[in-house]
Amino acid sequence: MDWILDFYNFRVVAQYIPDFARGLGSTAWISLLALVISLSVGTVVAIMRMSANQLLWRPAAAYVQAIRSTPLLIQIYVIYFTLPALPLLGRRLDELEGGIIALGLNAGAYMSEIIRAGIESISRGQVEGAQSVGMTYLQRMRYVVLPQAIARVAPTLLGQTAVLIKDSSLVSFIGVFELFGAGLLVYNERLMPNEGYLTVAACYLAIYAVMLSLTGYAQRRLGGTAG
Amino acid sequence: MIDVILSTMPFLLEGLWMTFKISLITIFFGSLIGTVVGMLRTLDYALITYPLGAYIHALRGTPFLIHLYFVYFMLPATGISWLQLEAFPAAVIALSLYTSTYVAEIVRGAIEAVPRGQSEAARSTGMTALQTMWYVVLPQAMKLMIPPMGGVYVIIIKGTSIVSVIGIAELVRAGEHATQRHPRELMLIYGMTAMMYFAYCYPVLRLARWAEAKFGSVRLPS
C-alpha cells in the first residue's frame, strides 16, 4: 500500500479535486469558444481561397501559410503581448481572450483546409443543379454545398477538434488557469509531479477517448472518410 | 528600430541554430522509433499490436507539454539515477517519442497501401517475410512516406518552441530574453521570431507539397 502512496498519493489528489474540476471546465470552455471561432474563420477562409478573385484568395492563402509555418506558442505571444488596445473594446485583450482568439485563429487555418477539401469533393452537378433553379451564390453555398461538404468532412473536423483541445494546454503559458494549470498548481504547492501531471494526463486521455468515439460515430452516421 | 534588430539578431540566430539542432536530432530518432513501431504494427500478432496501439493512443491523447513534463519532472522523481535527465536530452527524448507516433502511423499506412498481391507474389517465389519486406514492400512504401514526412518535420519544428519551458535556449527562449532587454519592442521581436520560424518551415511545407505531387501520398493523420 505504501508504495502506491509513494508513487501516486491519491489523498493529495482528492484534496485538489475542486481545482482539477475547475481546470477541466475551463479547458472545455476555452476549447468550445476557440472551436466556434475556428469553424467560422475556417469556413470563410475556405470559401475565400476558392474564389477566382485575387483580392480574396491571396490574403486567405497567406493566412493559412503563416499559421501553418509558425508555432502556436508564438501566435499566442504575438496576439497576447503585442496587440495594442482594441478600438471597439477600449482596452487590451486579457490573457483569457488573447488565448482563445489565438487558439481559434490557429485552428481556423487547419479547419479551412479540411472544409476546402470537403467543398471540392462536392460534385459539379450539385452546383449546376442549384444554379438552374435560380439560386444565388450565397444560397448555393448555404443550402447545397456547405451542408454536404461539412457532413463529409465531419470526422476529420472532429479529429482536428481533438488537436485543438490538446493545444489549449499552451494558454497556460500566458497565465490562464485550465486543466494543465491545475497540474502545475499541485506541482508548485506540493512538489508532487506524478499527482499533478498523471492526473492531468488521465483527464486529457478521457477527453480524447470521448472525441475518438464521437469521430467513430460521425463516420458511421455520415459515411465520411477517416481523419 | 534598426539598432534593436541589429542587436537582437545574433541572439535570435543562436536560438534558431538550437531549434535547428533539436529538430534535426529529433527527426532522426523519431523516425527510427516510429518506423520500428509502424512496421511492428502491421504484423498480425495481437500481443505486439495492442500494446503499440496503446502507446500511440496514449501519446496522441495527451498534449506534448505532458510528455515533456513526464520526461523532465516525473522520471527523475522515480529516484533511478540514469533517469535524471538534463534539459536537452529530456527535450529530445520527449519530442522523439511524440514524433514517433506520427511516423508510425505514416509507415503503417504506407505499408498497408502496397497491394497485398505484391507481398503474396514475393512469398510465393520463396522469399522470407523479411526479404519480402525489404526488397518488395518497403521500396514501394517508401515513396508514399516521403511527402507526409515533410508535414511531420514541420510539426517537430513547431514542437521545439514548447521546450523553451524547461529552459532550453531555442528560438522562443531567445525571443523572450530579447524582449526583456527591449521591453518596448515586443511586437518587433516576436515578429522577427515568427519570421524565422516561417523561413524554416515554409520551404519544408513547399517541398512536401512538391513531393506529394510527384510521389502521391498516404493520408497524414491529424
Image (tube, coloured by chain):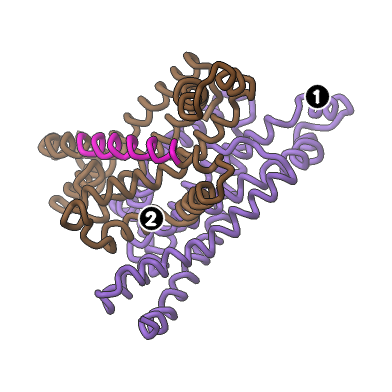
Chain colours: A brown, B purple
B16 vs B78: above or below:
below
The quadrant holding residue A208 is top left
Q: Label the magenta part by its dominant secondary structure.
A: helix
In this view, the residue in front, B85 or B4, is B4
Q: Amino acid at mark 2?
A: Leu
Residue bearing mark 2 = B83
In this view, the residue in front, A216 or B111, is A216
* A175 in the magenta segment: no
Chain letter for mark 1, please: B
The quadrant holding residue A118 is top right
**Residue A64, image x, y percentages:** 49, 49
Chain letter for mark 2, please: B
- Residue A214 visible in the shown view: yes
Q: What mark, if any, has residue B117 been given in the picture?
A: 1
Q: Are marks 2 and 1 on the same chain?
A: yes
Could you tell me which residue is drawn at 67 percent across and 39 percent down?
B217
Could you tell me which residue is drawn at 51 percent across and 35 percent down?
A114
* A43 in the magenta segment: yes
Name the N-terminal-most of marks 2 and 1.
2
| A85 displayed left or right of B25 | left
Q: Which residues are magenta?
A: A25-44
**Residue B55, image x, y percentages:** 46, 36
A184 vs A144: above or below:
below
A6 vs A139: above or below:
below
**Residue B96, image x, y percentages:** 50, 51
| B190 displayed left or right of A129 | left
Determine crowd level at label 1: few under 14, some 14-19, many 20+ residues with C-alpha closer than 10 A: few
Secondary structure found at label 1: helix
Q: Amino acid at mark 1?
A: Gly
